[in-house]
Image: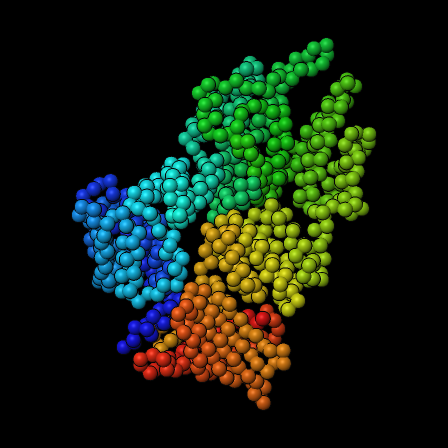
Amino acid sequence: MLAPFALLALISATETKPSLSVLYFDNNTGKAELDVLRKGLADMIVTDLVAWDGVTVLEREKLESVLGELKLQQAKAFDAKTRQKLGKLLGAKYLLSGSMTAAGQTLAVDAQLIEVETGAIKVSARASGPGEKIFDLEQELVLKVTAGIDARLRDAGQRKKVKVPDLETLLQYSKALDLSDQGKLDEAQKAMQEVVSKSPGFLLAREKKKAILEHLKESELKRRDIISGSIVELNKIADAALNAGKKIEDLDETQGRNLLAMRVIKQRFLSRLLKQYLSSRDEGFRMVLLGKEKEARQVMEAWAENQRQVIRDYKTFEKLHTKFYNGIPAPPSTSVQLDPNVEALVRDARVDSISISSRGIFEYSYFVLRGHAKDGDKTYIYAPALGDLNSAAQKQALEMLDEAYADAIAEHAKAPVARQPIYVSEAGNLANEKADVLLRLDRDEEAVAAYQKFLDTFPAAPNAERFEKSIEEIVGAKHSHERSVRERWQKALETCDDMDIRVGSGTLARKLNRLGHAGLAAHAAELEKKCKLEKKTRSAFAYTYQNLGMSAARHEDCEGFRSWFTKYLNAGGSVSDMKGYQRNHVPWCELGEIAKSIAFMHSKLDENWELEMNDDLSSVLSNDKKKFFLNGRSDNSKARLSFVLEVKPDGKYECKSVRWERGIGGGVNDGTCEVEITKFATESGDWDEGKYTASFPDENGPMKRTMKLTHGVYRLKRH
């Protein structure tokens, strides 16, 4: 049997720790107003336990989620069967449950650590004292629980976060948590602010206030995207009007204007509906979610059909209701007077003011050919656009631009001289729109032709000089940043130069805009086809895969995120940098086990415990190549394992020494070792692989013994 000190060392060394969930403690005080206190107390205990080595503590929010899934409020103690079900859903090996009782001013808190699988009670603990000393009671309780599982304190500062001044403050904190759990974020934020203002040194409350604010911001963004009851009602009203069988030519001006307004409302509804099938982390640029392609395309096509009808109806409306004064046309008003009830729904649904427009062809082109959609007062870009998905829709939209251009030229020919500039401007805008769309499609020669067609007709137009400059940029006679990046990418595919690849990677945005998620694979395929992963390209490949992984995560493809970062690590990317990218920028995508599958150093300790190093993993060859070092550290316990190998006359390396630093308070052991190299890296950034064993005599313990590492394997990146 192992001595207690040895057990402590083993627990801190292992990375495979059992998980523990803190349940809400039962309120047996007889005071119903203290029911909510369970949430604050659970949050304190969870935060405190994080400071200890020995278990992985699950967040209180996960418990709240599972309780909701099971439709349980924990009004009373759970029976063994329910506890087991709860523990399995939480993924916990242990549950910490308990109760609060009161006698006068004394508060007693009892706790039991229960093994989920067997229902066995592993630890029982009790702390009692004045209720106002709730912080001291919590600290005492956690000390007793952690002592029962041989856990060791590794972060004393973490425990100070839960220092609440008194019971009343904890009660207020608990009420704020409860409001947040109910989704009442505005109220929760105000309540938590009051706690912080009253007790500025209560660090746990400060952290929660910040988290609630972030949640509040995220909820506000989501609120703009949701299909609310108001916008559903608006859509019903629009559908009723549009399906009534009335034709624009049979209506008077007011009725015709209102029918067009219903088309605009339908358009706004479809723009909002489309968002349900798009990524939402980037408010301005959204990609069709994987698995939602069919639904998204159906909405796009419905939007396009509705807008084509808007264009047709507006033409008829304008023709019927344009008035002439002294031969000068006065088009009908585009302002709309909606029913007050409809106006109220428009405001509540946040779809922006409703008006009809003569620029329907431009809205159609923006949506179908560029992927621009308007929702409320904001425009977002979706990818891929309908025209990218459907070549027939793309062709039709380009033809509609040509028809509108021809109409503008025809109107110019008929118009009085004083009104001709109106049609010159219209034709110029249409020519520019077509050229921009063609450039987006990499149809540069056709874009030049669109500009030139206008210039041939109106060589002295106000925008002629700008069009001439655009032509020069397209053909390369003048600098264009976008064209420069495209050319740099083409050069990168020839030279495989690090800086060319990095600068040219700016073309990724163009691919995503046209291909959506498929643009990520297309970008990587271009690079991988032309360039080989080797010493001079490793850094550029890692940079590319990092960009692809982050783009996948931002658009909610977490599987793709992990796949690209696996390639990032294989290209020599840093594990710690990867963790930083994930933690600071895309925390909603978990890394999972990808780091362990790429770089690792792990073994069995005395055949029973996993000793795993998962940080600062590296191999180093001395400049004279006489010494070879293998290094790894545990990011949890701060334990470190270091091997020193020396070259033999036959050129092979032999392990001369190994040091195991067992982490905070764990001591240092030097030992003997054997290392079998199965793959020897040929350059920096390449991978060293092999097997190892080690023995560490422990002369300082009460039991003279030797600790052994067996079944050791490593895969380390050469520095």
Q: Position of residue 243 (x, y in %)?
A: 47, 24
Compared with 425, 156 (above or below) is: below
Determine the image quadrant of residue 611: bottom left
User: Residue drawn 78% across and 29% down?
Assistant: 462
User: Residue drawn 45% across and 23% down?
Assistant: 344
Image quarter in which the N terminus is found: bottom left
Q: Position of residue 565 (x, y in %)?
A: 53, 59
Q: Position of residue 425 (x, y in %)?
A: 73, 27
Residue 71 visible? The answer is no
Residue 189 appears left or right of 246: left
Image quarter in which the C terminus is found: bottom right
Q: Nearer the viewer, residue 522 or 643?
A: 643
Residue 359 visible? The answer is yes
User: Residue drawn 43% across and 33% down?
Assistant: 228
User: Residue drawn 55% across and 51% down?
Assistant: 551
Q: Nearer the viewer, residue 691 or 148?
A: 148
Residue 350 appears left or right of 181: right
Q: Position of residue 31 (x, y in %)?
A: 20, 42
Compared with 14, 493 (above or below) is: above
Determine the image quadrant of residue 453: top right
